[in-house]
Every structure is written in structure tokens, then in C-alpha cells.
Image: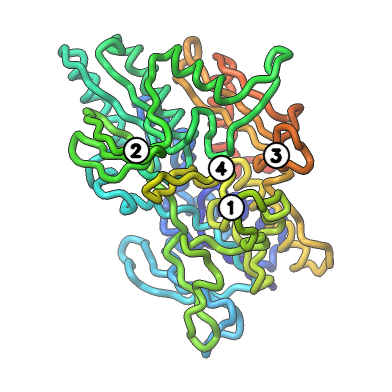
Amino acid sequence: MARLVILGAGVAGHTAALHARRMLGSSDEVLVVSPNSNWNWIPSNIWVGVGKMPVEKVIFPLAPVYRKKKIGFHQALALSIHPEGGEKHQRGYVVAKSTQPGSEDREEEIEYDFLINATGPKLNFAATEGLGPDSNSLSVCTAAHATETAKQLQAAIARLQAGENLRFIVGVGHGTCTCEGAAFEYTFNLDFALREAGVRDKAEVVYLTNEAQLGDFGVGGLVFTQQGYQTTSKIWTESFFRERDIHAVLGAHCTKVEPGMVHYEQLDGTTHDLSFDFAMLLPPFRGADLKAYDREGQDISDKIFNPAGFLKVDANYQAGAYENWRAADWPKTYQSPLYDNLFAAGIAFAPPHQISQPRTSPNGTVITPAPPRTGMPSGMIAKAVVETIVDRVKGNGKPAHEAPMTRIGAACVASAGMSFLGGSAASMTMNPIVPDWEAFPTTGRDLKGTSGEIGLAGHWMKHLLHVLFLYKAKAHPLWWVIPE
């Protein structure tokens, strides 16, 4: 019997757990350790955050699903990894602290034969003074955050309807943020909600981003063919902003958020202040606060994790300058180079470098999007990791399965307004996710698999994805037929 322990129950962790239980034998154990009792389909938090969808539509309790599928579930926060075991453990083990009501703070030691770190991001609001729902700005990163943001939006709309003029700022709250796509989505859903309420003429909407140009999205932008002509995501996105009368502040790093005021620095080194009545600003991500220890109890965290807390895997972290980086630097198997039974999936793995060109202001401030690795690639990576583990458990002797972001594509459907008759979405595909300039020297990506379109059909697709992925996540019949 083998025991697979999975840390985290987000897109990557939950996907890994369901596939592992489906593929492994009944005598093998699959166990999930997650501090959260609910699963959250995070992409639809955007709709919750503008009051278009109740929070109950984007979350469901994990425990009943895991009971049904015979997956062990510990509602607990992982504190440390001990890959070499210890005095009381011959196998590797994890120390976790319960978050279950009534048993909070109880610690347990959970042994494993294989471990997948799918802990996802720590929302690092502390990186910018005053950032976050507990301070001076709003968020849609969690279902609870999105619910509160919707309430604040309704209050702002009431003020507009009473005759006030307000400024809305949406974007990222730090120069190294990722998830620019989520900020983009919320910006245009906000615009749509204001137009529906008949108050758009009284609202100024500002998009504040660390992208050096619109359409970067943390992936260095896209080139695609549209109606027989090549265009760029920069031109495509700029036209969208002009049509909706949304002003973009580019290359920005928030230095401080005060009540009603954002302070920021731009790539040219200048500093600015911008007042607001409503601000939804996303935080940068860190890895989970996990430590690692060897058999003697010595701290080996710096060997296992990078300085941001993400797990080092089979990537080249020594490439040096941006010009030296190659597609081959990116991980393929997501296995730790130090421990062959330790893997990472989703946001938890350490990328070898940025995808967007690194940029620094004259003051030395890094203002560049971090590499996105959420959603579709997280699910694909999680499944590949599970397939590797299943082969090893069954003694098949096959090479590790691969899902390099330099060879897999992704589709992104960014909502721009929720309505079955009047809504729209920006539908984008890219192949590969990380540009491979050796394979595709002109654009870094295959033009046949890279596209962009804006329209009502995209909204229908976005809603269909919401329905399908919740169906899949609840492990309903034939759930595995739905692709990652």
C-alpha cells in the first residue's frame, strides 16, 4: 500500500486528488491536507465581486466529495515538510496544524510515500503598506473578499445614483504582482455594472497595472492572426480600453495605500498620488509558509524552496540574465531535484524566470508581472504529476510524465460583462504558454494555436466553463471526461 499526501485543495491539489483516487488501487491511500473547508472556483469570484453571482454558486464543501470518493481529508494547515523522516518516522512526513472548528491548533504528523505540494499562493497583502481588505483596498481573491467587494460596489453605485462623481481604481497593488487577467476582468465587469446601473457617466474608471504595455498579461503579450491579419494583444487590448473609456496607468508599483489614496511609482522613476472612492487591487503572491527539515532536524528550507517560498523543481535556476533564458529552462516533471517522491503543482512550483521582460525603475524598483501558472496549466500539471506517481506505485518503470509550460497551450476566457444577451468576454488561446523562441523564432508561439476574440459568444463559453468545472470539481459521473 502506498500513501499519497497532497497539500492544498485548490485547482491543482483537488485535481490531483480526484485523478489519483481514480487511477490508484483501492489499497492505496490518497490524503488531502488543506486549511480550507470549501472549494472555490476562483475565476467566478469576479462575478461575485460585482454582485452578478451569489457566493454559494462558486463554493462547495470539500468533505462530502472526499467521503464519496474515499479520499482522506485533514482540514489543517501544513507547517513543515520532513522529506527524510525523523526519529519517530522512517518515511517522510508533514507536520500540520488543525483548522477544524473545535480542534484548532492541534498538530499532527502525517507520513507519506509521495507528496505533492499544491499549496497555491499566500496572498501577500503585507508587501504594500495599507493594501488589502483588512486595510484600505478591496479584493476578489477569495469568495469572502469578493462578497465584501460586491457590497462596497453597491454602496458606491448608490452614491453615483445620488449625483456624486466617483473614481474607481482596479488593478494590482505591487510591482511584482501576477493575475493581471483577473484585474482586467474585474475592470470590465465593473464598467458593465456601472453602465447597467445607468451611472457610467458619473464614474471614472482607472486601470492600474505593473504591465509595461496593455495586453502583456504577464506572458509577454501575444501575436495572433485575426481575419487574415496579424495583430498583437497590445493593439487588441488598447482598442478595448478606448471603446469603454477606461484610462490605464502602466508600469506602476503601488508603494502605499491610504484611505482614499494610492501612492505609486512608475517605470520612469516618477512618483504619483491618485485619489479614489473605490479601489480593488490584487496582491502579489508568495509561497505558503512551509519549512523543511532533514532527518537530524536541520533547516533545509533554502534548499527545497526559493526565497519566495515556492518549491524548486526540475528547472534551470542558474540561467542568469534574461537574454540567456531558454524554453528548456522550464520544468517538465515538477519533481524536486533532491527528493524523487516530492513534487509541486500549480502556483506552488518555483518558475525559473519571468515570462514578461524584466524591468526596473531608475530607483531600482522591480516593476514586472510575475509568471502566471494558474487555472488550466495547474490542472494539466497536477494530472501529469499524478500519472508519474501512479506509474511508480504500480512499478511500471516508465519515465516521468511531462507537462512543460513551453509545450502546453492554454485558453483564457476573460469576462467583460455578465449577461446572456448583452454580455461579452475576451477569449484568448496561446500555444505554448511560455514562449519558445527557438521553435517559433518570429513570435515565440505557434500562430495556429494563438488567437483572440471579443464578443457575446465568449460570455456563453465563460458561463459554460463555470458550469463544467464545478461539475468536474464535485466529482459527478464521468467528471474526468471534462479536460483540465
Look at the numbered disc 3 and give the secondary structure of its residue. Answer: loop
Q: Secondary structure at mark 4?
A: loop
Whichever of labels 2 and 3 marks the residue nearer the N terminus, that label is: 2
Above or below 97: residue 445: above
Q: Which residue is mark 3?
A: 432
C-alpha distance separating marks 1 and 3: 16 Å
Q: Is residue 448 left or right of residue 238?
A: right
Q: Residues within 10 Å of mark 1 (few under 14, many from 20)?
A: many
Mark nearer the viewer, 1 or 3: 1
Name the residue beneath numbered marker 1. Answer: 353
Q: Earlier in the sequence, mark 1 or mark 2?
A: 2
Q: Considering depth in this image, is 183 or 211 the residue closer to the camera?
A: 211
Q: Quadrant of residue 442?
A: top right
Residue at the spot 65% in from the left edge and 73% down from the top edge: 339
**Which amino acid does the dot numbered 4 rest on?**
Gln
Total numbered badges shown on the rendered structure: 4
Q: Is residue 185 left or right of residue 393?
A: left
Which numbered disc flags the more N-terminal residue, 4 or 2? 2
For disc 4, the marked residue is: 357
* Foreground disc of the pair 1, 4: 4
Q: Measure how far apart labels 2 and 3 are at the Cα level.
A: 29 Å
**Residue 17 in sight from this viewpoint:** no
Q: Quick one: 190 or 359, which is closer to the camera? A: 359
**Residue at 37%, 38% in the rendered image:** 266
Residue 216 visible? The answer is yes
Q: Is residue 147 above or below residue 341?
A: above
Which residue carries the number 2 mark? 281
- Disc with the residue nearer the chain's start (1 vs 3): 1
At horizontal 68% and vertical 57% (from top left) the residue drawn is: 385
Q: Circles 1 and 4: CB distance less than 8 Å?
A: no
The secondary structure type at the circle numbered 1 is loop
